[in-house]
Image (cartoon, rainbow, N blue to C red):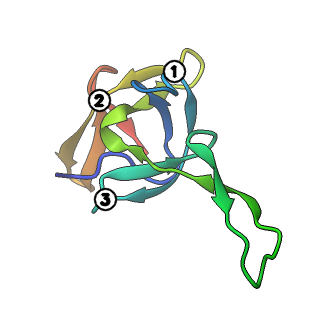
């Protein structure tokens, strides 16, 4: 499957606990089918005591979100989302937004 979401895209969560949240894509892991999104999936990991950290404690981690739960935001002001397709032009293959009447995406 083609990877339709890329690093730097503005996306909106369409399902799950963070539904309706928008953020910027920090990284995409296509083999796992997940993406790290800014402001989404922040969790706390409890660390048990060891020699390096005798007290133990907590550490903030970033949990990835499945790509199926993410939609690309086409219009920043109204936060409208769209599915993504591809169109072949003279300059090569470009991403286009389906609901935005084939608006090209950079």
Q: Quadrant of the C terminus?
A: top left
Vertical placement of residue 57 versus 71, above or below: below
Vertical placement of residue 51 versus 24, above or below: below
**Residue 20: which numbered mark, if any?**
1
- Density class for disc 1 (Cα within 10 Å; few <14, some 14-19, many ≥20) is some
- Density class for disc 2 (Cα within 10 Å; few <14, some 14-19, many ≥20) is some
The percent coordinates of residue 19 (x first, y second) are 48, 23
Circles 1, 2 touching at the beta carbon (< 8 Å): no
Vertical placement of residue 59 versus 100, above or below: below
User: Number of callouts in the render?
Assistant: 3
Which quadrant of the structure image shows residue 101?
top left
- Pick the front one: 52 or 49: 49
- Pick the front one: 51 or 6: 51
According to the image, label 3 marks what residue? Answer: 30
State left or right for residue 95 relative to residue 58.
left
Please report the residue visible at 55 percent of the width from the left and 14 percent of the height from the top: 78
Secondary structure at numbered mark 2: loop
Q: In the rendered structure, which disc, 1 or 2, sits on the residue that comes first in sequence?
A: 1
Q: In the rendered structure, which disc, 1 or 3, sits on the residue that comes first in sequence?
A: 1
According to the image, label 2 marks what residue? Answer: 83
What is the CA distance from the residue labelled 1 to the residue labelled 3? 23 Å
Circles 3, 2 touching at the beta carbon (< 8 Å): no
Vertical placement of residue 101 versus 33, above or below: above
The percent coordinates of residue 71 (x first, y second) are 38, 31
């Amino acid at each position: 499957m083609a990877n339709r979401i890329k690093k730097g895209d503005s996306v909106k969560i369409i399902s799950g606990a963070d539904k309706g949240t928008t953020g910027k894509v920090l990284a995409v892991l296509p083999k796992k089918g997940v993406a790290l999104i800014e402001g989404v999936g922040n969790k706390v990991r409890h660390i048990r005591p060891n020699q390096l950290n005798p007290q133990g404690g907590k550490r903030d981690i970033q949990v990835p979100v499945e790509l199926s739960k993410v939609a690309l935001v086409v219009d920043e002001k109204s936060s409208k989302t769209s599915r993504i397709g591809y169109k072949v032009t003279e300059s090569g293959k470009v991403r286009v937004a389906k609901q935005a009447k084939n608006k090209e995406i950079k």
